[in-house]
Image (cartoon, coloured by chain):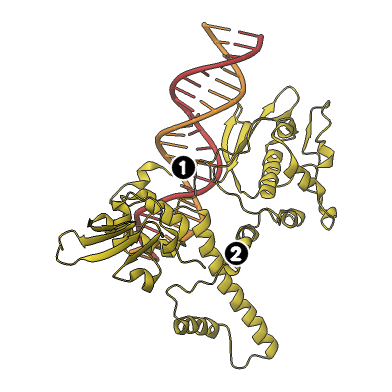
Chain colours: A yellow, B red, C orange
Amino acid sequence: MESSDSDFFGTDSDEEFPRGDDLDFLDDDTEADEDRPQDKRIAELSREDIMQLQFTDEEAVYQFYNTYAMMHGFVVRLDEVRHDSNGCIIMRQIVCNRAGSRKEEVEKDERIRDHRPLTRSCCRARIRARLDRKIHKWKVVSFYEEHSHGLVDPLDGDMVARYNLSSNSWVDQTFELRNLWVLAYLRDQFFGRIRTTSQCEGINSLIKAYVRKKDTLLEFINNMETVVSHYRNNERVAEFNSKYTDPVLVTSLPTLEDFAAKTFTRNMFREVRKEIEGACAMNTELVIQDGGKLYFKCNNFGVPEIDHMVEFDRVGGMLRCECLWFENRGIPCMHIFACLKHQHIEVIPECLVCKR
DNA sequence: AGCGTCGTACGGGCCTAGCT
DNA sequence: AGCTAGGCCCGTACGACGCT
């Protein structure tokens, strides 16, 4: 959307705060190099303040809410609109982009492809404004500030607003992923399922695409920076998808599956889900109970001759299966999930989650 | 590359409440 | 009673994305 005239919103004349002329930032390129305290003031507006706001037009409402969203760490989209008999817009609702929910009919069985991650969480955060014909201003008629989900750290919002980058998709994405990248590297190291040799081979293959024999030292350094940037970006995207989208639950153990979705990265979750699915088809029998220690015998439906023994120390919070799948792959095996199911345990014990 | 899936924007229906 | 507005929901067209 294009920016409008500078006094794009104000308040009723008897209101002291906020004054529209303190907040007219959207089309003033001449002040691009200065601090933008008005953006911070938008971030600090209370619901009561916002309910008093008036705007020059529908576009100004959008610009205001977009800035507000950026300062609070969420993304908006247009929602409901109402027209009068002449076709003029008289009401506009703008919502958090996680508003609504996926249509049920799409979640049907007999799918050809896997479910895409869920990006809607019935978030109620929104603003609704309506044209007041008497004063020819747009008034806020409804405002919800509560979100049904976590928000992205908005600290860099100043910079984004300052350079008018709110509509830049690359900036949006990078901004949303920034803190995740830091987190991924400050946590404990994680090498699950990655051999050092295969890691090196992968990196070598990647670098080959960027480095040539005839490169000067300067070119080499520049190219290496590009390689690292792309490599890290892939990590960021994977981390973002794991943290800010939710997979559709498809197994018959949804509580365990949901816990796994929130605990593991998305790629690892897909592996874990296969084990949970396997556990659904397992027979489990408690064979020994020695104080707090339980010993289970598990076998696949239809294959009773092949047993797997699982030891469960309820006091020590330790689970161990003789198949050593967890020790080898870093994720719990279906036998362990079968025992958790047997014991009506709906969360994955801490000992079965590899920290990174 | 094709196409299944889903996000986005919008139109419109229905119900309720408040005002004239 | 009639009108307008608020709130919620459903359906549809269209396009983007990304899996196969």
Coordinates of residue A14 in the picture (x, y in percent) = 83, 25
Helix, strand or loop at mark 1: loop
Please rate how many residues cluster around mark 1, counting C-alpha atoms within 10 Å: few if below 14, some from 14 to 19, many from 20: few
Whether residue A1 can be seen here: no
Q: Is residue A234 above or below residue A251?
A: below
Residue drawn at (41%, 63%), measured in percent from left and top? Answer: A352
The amino acid type of the residue labelled 2 equals Leu
Could you say which quadrant of the image residue A93 lies in? top right
Could you say which quadrant of the image residue B3 lies in? bottom left
The answer to whether residue A51 is left or right of residue A185 is: right
Q: Which residue is mark 2?
A: A183
- Are the residues under marks 1 and 2 on the same chain? yes
Q: Which residue is mark 1?
A: A101
Residue drawn at (41%, 59%), measured in percent from left and top? Answer: A317
Q: Chain of mark 2?
A: A
Residue drawn at (69%, 34%), measured in percent from left and top? Answer: A47
Could you say which quadrant of the image residue A5 lies in? top right
Q: Earlier in the sequence, mark 1 or mark 2?
A: 1
Coordinates of residue A150 in the picture (x, y in percent) = 57, 49
The answer to whether residue A223 is left or right of residue A308 is: right
The answer to whether residue A64 is left or right of residue A97 is: right
Whether residue A64 can be seen here: yes
Coordinates of residue A6 in the picture (x, y in percent) = 81, 42
Instruction: Tell me the tag on residue A319.
Output: none
Coordinates of residue A100 in the picture (x, y in percent) = 49, 41
The amino acid type of the residue labelled 1 equals Ser
